[in-house]
Every structure is written in structure tokens, then in C-alpha cells.
């Protein structure tokens, strides 16, 4: 006797359009590329249909209309210790972190730096994050060594006192290029890698934290290699303002 299923038990599997799970907030734009206006932001963890991959994002079909997306990188947690101004963690010569805060790189920031390195590679630019998280104790040793070799006044221009280094936040990355002789050197500014960073880092949520000619404000000399993770939204705003983070948030360095 043939096994027959009642009609209500039969499920028809329809060919579904391909969908992608968003692993970060995704901006849906009018056109392809970040110069186009954002129509809506799809939150992390949603299934979205797409038509085809296009550049950094996807050409999408939402409610029958063709739209474009690009990945954004979320702002870091505001639950870690330290001083927050308008939701941004501030570590500089005035604001410090407790010696006990020792959490390593923040995952979100690492994801963004990896994506940036990957994109640069596609543009034939080789980037390396040669110095990232630094503990309070490690910074103490470094700073004391610099004071011994350069004197306190000079050391304070390029090295942070323990608790005052952005590297302790897990949100700072020193980026170098193919030639390590330019790493953490002024000569890095002229390399194609530094130019690529200056042009693209904000799309991945990073700002060049110590810009040229702003030592009086930031407390540090120009460091074209030191990137600080803010998340895409804030990084874009800070870049567009042309200001240092201190000026942008209206506080003292
Ligand atoms: Zn640095």
C-alpha cells in the first residue's frame, strides 16, 4: 500500500533568493559607494537578500527596489573603564585608564583592522599592524626606557606615561607598510601605505589620532601610523571635521 500524506503535511520547497546574514550594521545606499546617501541601516544579525556582490557591499533587492549596501563598523563598547565624552572613550595626557584594565585588543576593532588590511591588499597596498594592545606594565617599562635614553621632556612628546597610552584601550593600532624601516618613523608619511590609510581608514572606523601640526592639542607629535578605532559613524564625522579628537569633543589634550 503506497504511503500517502495528507495534503496539509506536504510542504513545497520554493527556490528562495540567496540571503546573507549581516555580521555588522549595514548601510543601504542609493548608489554603489559610500558617497551615496544612506537610505536605511540594517542591523547586525539580519538575513538580507542580495542580487550580486558589488565592491565592498551588495547590490540588493529590497521590496522590489534595487539598493546598495556597504559594511559599517560599530562603535566600541562604552562599558570598559575610563572617561567617556559623548560616548567616546578618551585616553590622553589628562585622562587615564586604571592599571588593572588589561583586556587585550577589542574584538570589533580587530575585525575592522583585518578588513582594512584585506581591502588594502586588493589595492596592492600591504599593511601590517605591528603594535596593538599594550598593557599598563609594558607601557611603564617602555616609558621609563625612553626617559632614560631621551630625557623626560622628549619622551613625553612621543611616549605615553603608563595608564595614558591609547594602546591600553585595545582600540589603537600602529600600522606599517611593506618596508619596516619606515615603521613608527616620520618617513612613513610619504609612503603609499600611509597615503592609503589617510584616504580609507575612516571607512573601517579608524582615525589618525595624532595629526600633523596638532601636538599642542593632542600632546603628541605627528604619528601617521597610529590609528584609533571609533567605529565608522564617528570616524567619518571626525575626519570630515578636520579636527583632532580633542577638538571634536571639545576637551583638553
Ligand atoms: Zn601607537
Image: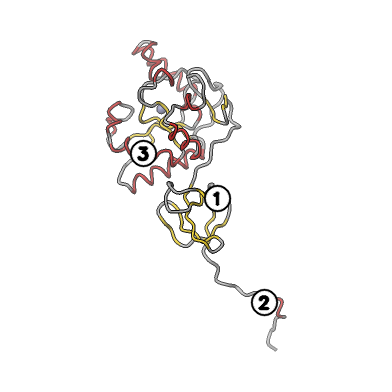
Q: Is residue 99 above or below residue 228?
A: above
Colour scheme: secondary structure
Q: In the rendering, at what x and y percent does residue 221 appear? A: 37, 21
Quarter residue 84 falls in: top right
Q: Is residue 134 above or below residue 64?
A: above
In the rendered image, which residue does mark 2 sit on? Answer: 10
Of the two numbered discs 2 and 1 on the same chain, state the one appearing first in sequence.
Answer: 2
Q: Which mark is residue 40?
A: 1
Q: Which mark is residue 24?
A: none
Q: Residues within 10 Å of mark 3 (few under 14, many from 20)?
A: few
Circle 1 sits in a helix, a strand or a loop, which is it?
strand
Q: Which mark is residue 199?
A: 3
Labelled pair 2, 1 in contact (Cβ < 8 Å) = no
Circle 2 sits in a helix, a strand or a loop, which is it?
loop
Alpha carbons under labels 3 and 1: distance apart: 25 Å
Q: In the rendering, at what x and y percent does residue 247 appear? A: 47, 24
Q: Is residue 137 above or below residue 107?
A: above
Alpha carbons under labels 3 and 2: distance apart: 56 Å
Alpha carbons under labels 2 and 1: distance apart: 38 Å
The image quadrant where one finds ligand 1 is top left
Depth check: 24 or 87 in front?
A: 87
Circle 3 sits in a helix, a strand or a loop, which is it?
helix
Q: In the rendering, at what x and y percent does residue 4 appear? A: 69, 84
Q: Going 39% across and 22% down the picture, which residue do you hit? A: 214
Amino acid at each position: 500500500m503506497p504511503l500517502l500524506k495528507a495534503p496539509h503535511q506536504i510542504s513545497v520547497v520554493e527556490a528562495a533568493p540567496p540571503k546573507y546574514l549581516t555580521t555588522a550594521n549595514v548601510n543601504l545606499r542609493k548608489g554603489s559607494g559610500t558617497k551615496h546617501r544612506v537610505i536605511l541601516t540594517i542591523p547586525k544579525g539580519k538575513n538580507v537578500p542580495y542580487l550580486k556582490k558589488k565592491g565592498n557591499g551588495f547590490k540588493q533587492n529590497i521590496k522590489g527596489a534595487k539598493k546598495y549596501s556597504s559594511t559599517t563598523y560599530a562603535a566600541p563598547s562604552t562599558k570598559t573603564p575610563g572617561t567617556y565624552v559623548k560616548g567616546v572613550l578618551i585616553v590622553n595626557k589628562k585622562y587615564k585608564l586604571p592599571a588593572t584594565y588589561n583586556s587585550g585588543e577589542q574584538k570589533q576593532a580587530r575585525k575592522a583592522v583585518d578588513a582594512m588590511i584585506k581591502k588594502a591588499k586588493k589595492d596592492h597596498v600591504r599593511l601590517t599592524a605591528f603594535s596593538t594592545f599594550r598593557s599598563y606594565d609594558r607601557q611603564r617599562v617602555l616609558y621609563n626606557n625612553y626617559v632614560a635614553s631621551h630625557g623626560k621632556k622628549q619622551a613625553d612628546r612621543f611616549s605615553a606615561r603608563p595608564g595614558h597610552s591609547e594602546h591600553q584601550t585595545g582600540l589603537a593600532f600602529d600600522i606599517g607598510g611593506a618596508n619596516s624601516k619606515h615603521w613608527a618613523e616620520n618617513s612613513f608619511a610619504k609612503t603609499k601605505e600611509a597615503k592609503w590609510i589617510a584616504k580609507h581608514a575612516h571607512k573601517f572606523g579608524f582615525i589618525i589620532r595624532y595629526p600633523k601640526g596638532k601636538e599642542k592639542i593632542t600632546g603628541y607629535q605627528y604619528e601617521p601610523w597610529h590609528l584609533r578605532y571609533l567605529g565608522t559613524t564617528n570616524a567619518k564625522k571626525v575626519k570630515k571635521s578636520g579636527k583632532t579628537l580633542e577638538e571634536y569633543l571639545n576637551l583638553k589634550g
